[in-house]
Image: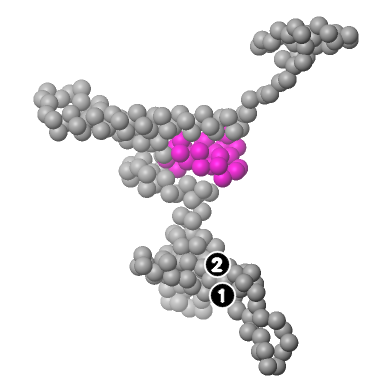
Amino acid sequence: MSKNPKNQSKAVDAGAKLPAKPNKEKSLTKPYTVDEVRDVIKGTLHFPCDPDYILKKSTKEFNAWLDAPTDKEREEAKKIMIETHNEALIALGLETHYPLADMVGKRYRALAIEVARQFEKEYNCKAPSEKLLAQTIAGTYCKIIEYSPHLRGLAHETSVSKEKNDYYAMISKELDRSHRQMLTALTMLRQIKNPPIELNVKAKTAFIAQNQQINAVNNPENKSVEQ
């Protein structure tokens, strides 16, 4: 696969064959409609960055590695396969959480991935939106861990300057922003997994409180609803 960014916008054949164009002179078959041509294009042409194309190519190269007849050919096929597999791992980022590695420094990359997996496990994240929130929480948390030591060094500074003040002000803003993003994502994830209960009560007199009952005065059977 080409690494030239300009080639990312060039469509490539995914392996499917285009149907033969009907011959008006020899056949009464009607010409293809716009919708039919659209389906043909969608099924046969892809950008190199399309996850479906990447996975198809990765599968093809994986099978080529297994079927290589000699050790030399197998080693060459393995190199090609690994290169494509790296792209596939990024394409499956919601499952692997590997894109988080680009959000923080090398020291905290493993931590970011592990935190995302722990939140995914804790809240049983299945939907893409839930996994995305788990990644947001993990990424912003690791940013907090990464930025905090810079402010800690401020306590030992014996001199100040405009450049230092601007630098620490920037770090402080980034920390505040990361805290807000983390708490917002965590709140949203909790709301998705534990939505609030809606309760409609029709009565002239009702008292609602935690761990208490709702008593409807007009109810002839004097039913109560336990909370």
Q: Any magenta on residue 157?
A: no
Magenta part, dominant SS: helix
Image-based side of 225 in relation to 172, left or right: right
Give the amino acid at mark 1: Gly
Task: Tell me which residue sits at (20%, 26%) in the image.
Answer: 154
Q: Which mark is residue 78?
A: none
CA gap between label 1 and label 2 equals: 9 Å
Circles 1 and 2: CB atoms closer than 8 Å: yes
What stretch of residues is rendered in magenta? Answer: 112-138
**Of 52 and 214, which appears nearest the observer?**
214
**Of 39 and 3, which appears nearest the observer?**
39
Work out whether 187 lies above or below 129: above
Q: Which mark is residue 15?
A: 1
Residue 31: name its quadrant: bottom right
For the question of whether residue 64 can be seen, the reply is no
Q: Which mark is residue 56?
A: 2
Callout in the foreground (1, 2): 1
Q: Any magenta on residue 136?
A: yes
Task: Tell me which residue sits at (49%, 51%) in the image.
Answer: 93
Q: Say which quadrant the N terminus sits in.
A: bottom left
Image-based side of 20 in relation to 218, left or right: left
Residue 32: name its quadrant: bottom right
Task: Tell me which residue sits at (36%, 36%) in the image.
Answer: 143
Residue 45: horizontal and vertical position, in percent?
A: 53, 71
